[in-house]
Image (cartoon, rainbow, N blue to C red):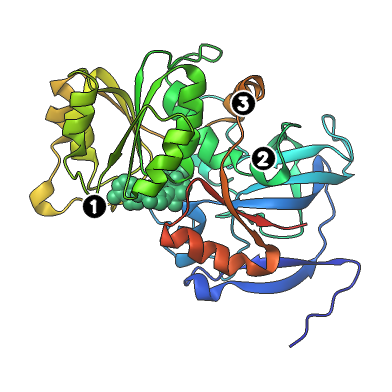
Amino acid sequence: MPIYRTMSSIQQWTTSLQGLDSLELSEATKPTPSTGEVLVEIHAVSLNYRDFEVCSGEYTHHRSVSQDKPSLVPCSDMCGVITEVGDGVKHWMVGDRVLSTFLPGHQTGQVTEEMMASGIGLPQPGVLAKYRAFPEHALVRAPSYLTDEEASTLPIASVTAWMSINGMRPMGQNGGAGEYVLLQGTGGVAIAGLQIGKASGAKVIITSSSDEKLEQAMQLGADHTINYRTNPNWEEEVTRWTGGHGADIILETGGAQTLRKSFDCIAWGGLIDCIGYLSGKVDAPEDRTNVNLLALRRNVTLKGIINGPKDRFEEMIAFYEKHRIKPVVNRVFSFNEAPDAFKFLANGSHFGKVVVKVA
Ligand SMILES: NC(=O)c1ccc[n+]([C@@H]2O[C@H](COP(=O)([O-])OP(=O)(O)OC[C@H]3O[C@@H](n4cnc5c(N)ncnc54)[C@H](OP(=O)(O)O)[C@@H]3O)[C@@H](O)[C@H]2O)c1
């Protein structure tokens, strides 16, 4: 059936959280900004693994994030331009180019359970739409040297990588120089970690299931690459290549099948950032990881990561601007092709980020 549009209606994608086949293009009333809000014309939306999980009804590991949604606009990461400013808005003007933040309630410090309720793209409506109204505190200024598509990738993937490398250091004391940083796979978080690590002066090791992707990682500056399919004991290779030292920081995006290996190649006093679960959320009973002893064994810090606060996002943007880091956009889909973009992401053949061009 054709969709008829009026001046006050906009297009948006919605999901009933029942799988990617439940994604539906629909019409909605164009939002008007309330007091303290701005209206953003969305130009580009970057997909995250989380968005695939949300659409599939599998983003269930935060008890405070309600799944009880008959219909939801998915996705959290966008770059767009402010087209209307509500009463009382102090920091933004029409024409400003902005980025969303994943948890607008998380402005500084550690994340809390209450802040999870502000999550864009679950439980709050997301950004896979032509327009969205945002409270003014929910946005950061987009770096001018990046395209809309590149800039849209920063809120989740880059901020998560930034916090994994720098979140344990005080603001303004960004480190990494001379440290060994280990990245797992070549998805959005890992490739952002590679770029941040290299710009910081770290020695970066990256794993992948694909030699072709490892070659791409080398071109981005990776110091050492390991194929985790052909070399399943990659933790031994990390230990060998670092001369027995191990990795100082590990961005643990693998989860169930990688954490034990990470404990076996972490440096003494090193940091394992628990970020993701691409190899599963739950250990097989025979692989049970005795985290208590493993953490104690080398005086390891195990840190759960949920993205990062707005002030650290802005700190990261200043770092990106200084080093002119260009996020890696692997493929751009049109707005109408959004379901194909999700399938492409879920299939895991990408290197870096997958983006939907909206405007
Ligand atoms: N906690 C947070 O704040 C946060 C933020 C962002 C993401 N995450 C989580 O972190 C994970 C990564 O997110 P992402 O956005 O980077 O995902 P992504 O872009 O979808 O990454 C996919 C890539 O991960 C790699 N991979 C798959 N299985 C793997 C395994 N068994 N071991 C190592 N690598 C594997 C593959 O790389 P190759 O093809 O190169 O093998 C695959 O292409 C997800 O679980 C996501 O939910 C958490």
User: Does the beta carbon of the residue at mark 3 sit less than 8 Å from ligand 1?
Assistant: no
How far apart are the two marked residues, 1 and 2, measured between alpha carbons?
33 Å
Q: Which residue is mark 1?
A: 282
Q: Is residue 232 visible?
A: yes
* Residue 320 position within the rendered picture, expressed as x and y whole percent measured from the top left: 62, 26
Q: Is residue 293 left or right of residue 159?
A: left
Of callouts 2 and 3, which one flags the residue occurring earlier in the amino acid sequence?
2
On the image, which quarter does residue 306 sit in? top left
> How many numbered marks, from 0 up?
3
Q: Amino acid at mark 3?
A: Tyr
Q: Identify which residue is drawn at 49% across, 33% down.
A: 220
Secondary element at image label 1 = loop
Crowdedness of circle 2 by 10 Å Cα count: few (<14), some, many (20+)? many
Q: Tag 2: residue type?
A: Ala
Q: Which mark is residue 76?
A: none
Label 3: element kind: helix
> Which residue lies under the disc numbered 2?
151
User: What is the crowding at mark 3: few (fewer than 14 residues within 10 Å), some, or many (at least 20)?
Assistant: many
- Residue with the mark numbered 3: 320
With respect to residue 267, does 143 lie above or below?
below
Tell me: is circle 1 under 8 Å from ligand 1: no
View extreme (bottom): residue: 1
Label 1 close to label 2 by CB (< 8 Å): no
Return the x and y of residue 62 as percentages of the image width and height.
Answer: 41, 49
Residue located at (36% from left, 16% from top): 179
